Image: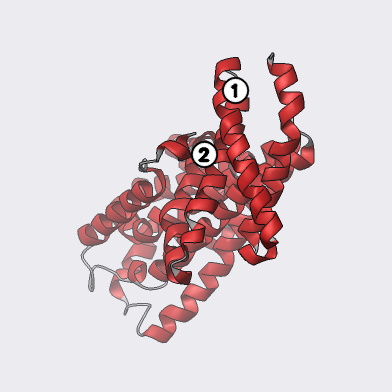
Amino acid sequence: MDIDRFLHERSQRWDRLATLLDKAEQAPERDLGPDGMRELLRLYRLTSSDLNEARSLTADPEILERLNALAGRGYRFIYRRRRGGGVPRRVGAFIAREVPEAFQRHGTAVLAAVGALLLGAFFGAAAVLVRPQTAEDFIPEQFFTQSPRERVEEIEKNEERIANVEDAAMFSSELYTHNIQVSFLAFSLGALTLAGGLWILFYNGIILGAVAASYFLDGVTVFFLAWVGPHGALELPAIALAGAAGLAAGRALLLPGQLSRGASVRQVFPRVWRMMVGTMLILVVAGLIEGSFSQFSAKTVPYPLKISVAVILHAGLILWLFLPRRRTDEEAG
């Protein structure tokens, strides 16, 4: 059998399995009914067999990747979710495995999003280092009311800005709103235009680089790292990760390849929404840190300690999302 005939004969059942899995993953198992569960199990076994056959027919990574992803989803649903364990176990599996797997499956989108942010930061920093007056053009006016050194002196001289839990909670809630808006903007522009998502990440990188260079030129780099580091170690990657989810969705919508647009979107949707849920969890933690720990000056928390915490948080985030997990033979196809 040649590959074209193979795709023509088997694609319909792959689409049907993806549809059943979409329904099963978004609703209780019982919504499928006994017949639906039997059909899902049958199609999963057939698709696993198709994957092995496809490997002997073609080396096309797109075909093999699609079948491998579909067989993996079927395996996870049939052999893990049906084991039960209650809500805590399912939530734990979602956070510990499903969210990281989604980001790892879209590693190219993650690299593109992070690259756009870092490229913007490099551009913004270089422009300010070459011509310091450029900072006034890049940094929003509301953040350019005083020099970095003047701001540092004021913060270190005055009382701590966060005096109690209520202050921290109120400040954190304001930060959630802003960070979620930026993240959803990056996601939406990426999903609808691809280029727009990359641009908004590049633009935010320019602002970050310009601010960092301004603090460096004023000789208060340690303060900047200690002030921004603890929450920035999570917040900045989260914005890039939201942009990556948008790029993954945008590729499925705008560049579906051999699949129909609808089938392409249905295939990627379960991973994209896991990426966005993971991003929101990261932003919640970042907001809590920014509304409390990040606001302490050296009078309360030494700056080297705050920078160390930032390094640990960032390393933990990378390990959580991108440390390879052991996969069973059936998951691997």
**In the picture, residue 67 is in which quadrant?**
top right
Q: Is residue 148 above or below residue 255?
A: below
Q: How is the image coloured?
A: secondary structure
Image quadrant where one finds the N terminus: top right
How far across and down, in percent of the image, does residue 8 sit? 77, 25
How far across and down, in percent of the image, does residue 142 sit? 56, 63
Q: Is residue 285 above or below residue 36?
A: below
Q: Residue 326 — which label?
A: none
To which residue does mark 1 refer?
54
**In the picture, residue 229 is in which quadrant?**
bottom left
In depth, the one of 121 and 159 nearer the eye is 121
How far across and down, in percent of the image, does residue 171 sit? 48, 76
For disc 2, the neighbor class at 10 Å (few under 14, some 14 to 19, many from 20) is some
The kind of secondary structure element at disc 2 is: helix
What amino acid type is highlighted by mark number 2?
Arg
To which residue does mark 2 refer?
105
Which label lies toward us, 2 or 1? 1
How far across and down, in percent of the image, does residue 190 sit? 66, 43
Q: Is residue 265 above or below residue 174?
A: above
For disc 1, the neighbor class at 10 Å (few under 14, some 14 to 19, many from 20) is some
Distance between the alpha carbons at the discs numbered 2 and 1 = 20 Å
What amino acid type is highlighted by mark number 1?
Ala
**5 displayed left or right of 152:** right
In depth, the one of 94 and 273 nearer the eye is 94
In depth, the one of 213 and 330 nearer the eye is 330
